Image (cartoon, helix red, strand yellow):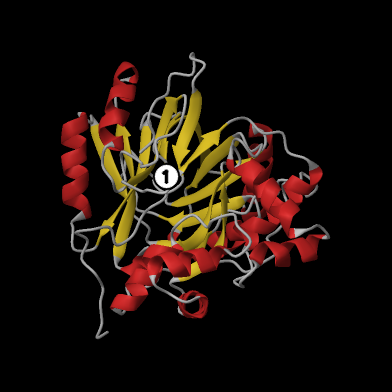
Amino acid sequence: MTIALDRSTDLKHWECRECEYQLNADAAPSVCPLCSEGDSPFIEKRPVELESMDRQIANRLQNGIPLVSEPWAALGEELGVSADEVMERIRKMKADVVRQVSAIFDSRSLGYHSTLVAMKFAPDDIDRAAGVINRHPGVSHNYRRNHVFNLWFTLTIHKSQSIQEEVDRLGAAAGSLHTILLPTIRLYKIGVKLDVTGEKDVTRKEEGKIVQGIREAQELTLREVEAVRVLQRDLPIEPRPFEIWAQKFGFTEEELFAHAQSFMDRGIMRRFAAVLRHRNAGFSANAMGVWIVPEERLEEVGAIIAEYAAVSHCYQRPVYPPDWNFNLFSMVHGKTTEDCLQVLDLIAAQTGIPEYTMLYSTKEYKKVRVKYFLPGTPLPVANA
């Protein structure tokens, strides 16, 4: 949950590393009042100026960290600096730029389903409505956008729950004037990797593997469920961070590494990496480019869009004529709106698809991690 903050005071700004609860206070509480995480989970949030090495580390962290006993030493050797310097710089960036370093899981593989939802509210009512939507624990992202459908959020819940029923309840509680569900039909790309160094062309093509395709839910053992609960946490910035987890949660390092590798081999985990705060990392613009693509060209156009590094997500979604006719979505990130426009114009020229529009985020109401297998959640458990 993201809480609206009063920044007019001289109090320090704190955020829980595990649930991202925020508060202003002289000192952080030792236990989070929202998620009950102990051991002083709060870090102080403040603006950070990035140096060249910070930017190199931020880029490298997004691609994945080495799953070894001393990952920061391994990164330091790769970048030509000490492990202590790597840790010091990451700790500094955690105050503003690095959201978390953890496993990035595929929701469907873990037995969850999700949808993008667009709702319409009167402009002077949208802030109140967003507050109602934010209270749902399955809402991870919630934005105001420049469109008649002006509130857009993602909802992720266990597959034993009905997406339609949950959205209906949310719409009724918030007073939505019009609601459309936009679940993924086809996934052409997912994965955010920002060039924080600013050295690469915004229109460049993707350099690494493109994650695509919708996966089915997999059965996990009870031990694997526990491993998911551990690996989704924010990795300690200490010399041997996995050893800290192993001792605290009843695993060995070797077990955690084996589970992580198994999850990646099976497509359950995409990577173990950092997620950045886009705006604080210098990417103040993000445009949802939406396209009207003939059905017979969706695979072709989706593959072309997915090749652009600035595109983090590309999906086919349903249409609702006459209110919503766009069937292909592409999320583009840039330092400026001009960056986003440049990428989308190139896509339009390359594909020959002229019918698209850009929806910009004009206000962020909520952006948190999805947490899996919280108490009371059904478990996809096979024989242990």
Q: Nearer the viewer, residue 28 or 309?
A: 28
Quadrant for the N terminus, please: top left
Q: Position of residue 252 (x, y in %)?
A: 47, 77
Q: Position of residue 368 (x, y in %)?
A: 42, 44
**Residue lying furthest top in this view?**
8
Residue density around tag 1, few if under 14, some if 14–19, many if 20 or more, within 10 Å: some
Q: Quadrant of residue 322?
A: top left
**Residue lying furthest bottom in this view?**
383
Q: Say which amino acid is labelled 1.
A: Val
Quadrant for the C terminus, please: bottom left
**Residue at 46%, 74% in the rendered image:** 267
**Residue at 34%, 19% in the rendered image:** 123
> Is 310 above or below relative to 33?
below
Q: Nearer the viewer, residue 88 or 384?
A: 88
Q: Nearer the viewer, residue 342 or 56?
A: 56
> Is 384 above or below relative to 156?
below
Q: Nearer the viewer, residue 235 or 144?
A: 235
Q: How many marks?
A: 1
Q: Position of residue 255 (x, y in %)?
A: 47, 79
Q: Quadrant of residue 158?
A: bottom left
Q: Secondary structure at mark 1?
A: loop
Q: Is residue 106 visible?
A: no
Location of mark 1 (residue): 368
Q: Quadrant of residue 86?
A: bottom right
Q: Is residue 131 visible?
A: yes
> Is 143 above or below relative to 302?
above
Q: Position of residue 116 (x, y in %)?
A: 35, 48
**Position of residue 208 in the picture relative to residue 189 (left or right):** right
